[in-house]
Amino acid sequence: MTHFFKMLSPGSFRATVCFSALIALSSAHAGLFDDEEARRAILDLRQKVEAAKVDTDQKFADQLKRSTDESAQLRRSLLDLQSEIEGLRAELAKLKGQNEQSVRDLADIQKRQKDMTQSVDDRLRRFEPGKVTLDGREFMAEPVERRDYEAALAMFRKGEFGAVQVVFVDFLSRYANSGYRSSALFWLGNAQYATKDYKEAMANFRNLVVGAPDHQRAPEAMLAIANCQLELKDTKGARKTLEELLVNFPNTDAAAAGKERLARFK
């Protein structure tokens, strides 16, 4: 290169130097221009990035706000639903309590109705004839009839033999066709025997045997007749009665007792 410049004339050398300088200046200017464009591009890109970041942040903020609002709305809805559920539970409990109370009230009403019905039945039963089983027999009797007989028998069991005779006589008079008649005659005869009224006792025992020979008390009544006859010193009559007892009621306790007494006469 130095050899090249030495071969140039002074004018050509100056021209060459100026041309080189112009080329260098142009190159420098071009380099400066390229850096400026790059800076502007970088700034522009940076602005775009910032704008995109701002836009992204704004969108995120908006989305977050919407999500927060939706979450708040959902929580409010859940709270409202929970409140409604609690209200329904309370109403259900109230209805259940009312139902249980209604069941109790119905049970009370049914019990009172049953008690009232029972009370009415009991009252009616006091005035209606009822079935009675006594001394192996069944018959219908008025409540007052049953009450009077049981009252008389209670007096006899207390040993009120004198007073109970009046009661039994009155009973037989008022209830002449009563199913209690034969039993009443038996206890009346025993009360009279206890007070040593042997003739009247014997008469009532005979009424029992003649009126109801198949009655459960008939064998005892015949034995009682024989006892009355013995008390009245009627040994012959007593023997005859005991013999009839053995014939008519052979397999009874009364017949067994009568047989022993017959043996004493021999």
Image (spheres, rainbow, N blue to C red):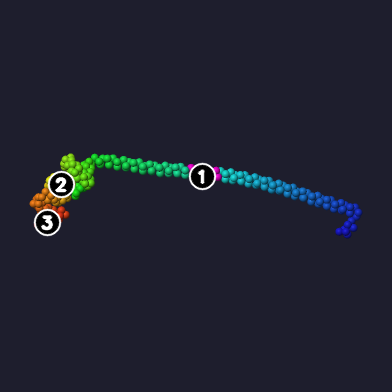
As helix, strand or loop, the secondary structure at mark 2 comes to loop
Measured as percent of width and height from the top left, residue 147 is found at 23, 42
Q: Quarter of the image holding residue 166?
A: top left
Q: Taken as a whole, is the magenta stretch helix, strand or loop?
A: helix
Please give the label number shown on residue 196: 2
Classify the position of the C terminus by image quarter: bottom left
Please give the label number shown on residue 82: 1
Classify the position of the N terminus by image quarter: bottom right
* 181 to the left or right of 39: left
Real-space CA distance between mark 3 and mark 2, rounded to the nearest whole angstrom: 23 Å
* 93 to the left or right of 5: left
Disc 1 marks a residue whose amino acid type is Gln
Front-lying residue, 177 or 206: 206
Q: Which one is closest to the eye, mark 3 or mark 1? A: 3
**Looking at the image, which residue is at 32% across and 42% down?**
115
Which residues are the magenta region?
74-88
Mark 3 highlights which residue? 264
Q: Quick check: can you spot residue 196?
A: yes
Disc 3 marks a residue whose amino acid type is Arg
Q: Are marks 3 and 1 in contact (CB under 8 Å)?
A: no
Badge 2: residue crowd in 10 Å (few <14, some 14–19, many ≥20): some
**Looking at the image, which residue is at 19% across and 50% down?**
136
Q: Quick check: can you spot residue 183?
A: no
Measured as percent of width and height from the top left, residue 141 is found at 20, 43
Real-space CA distance between mark 3 and mark 1, rounded to the nearest whole angstrom: 106 Å
Is residue 172 rendered magenta in the image? no
Front-lying residue, 153 or 54: 153
Disc 2 marks a residue whose amino acid type is Lys
Measured as percent of width and height from the top left, residue 65 is found at 61, 44
As helix, strand or loop, the secondary structure at mark 3 comes to helix
* 120 to the left or right of 163: right
Residue extending furthest toward the bottom: 3
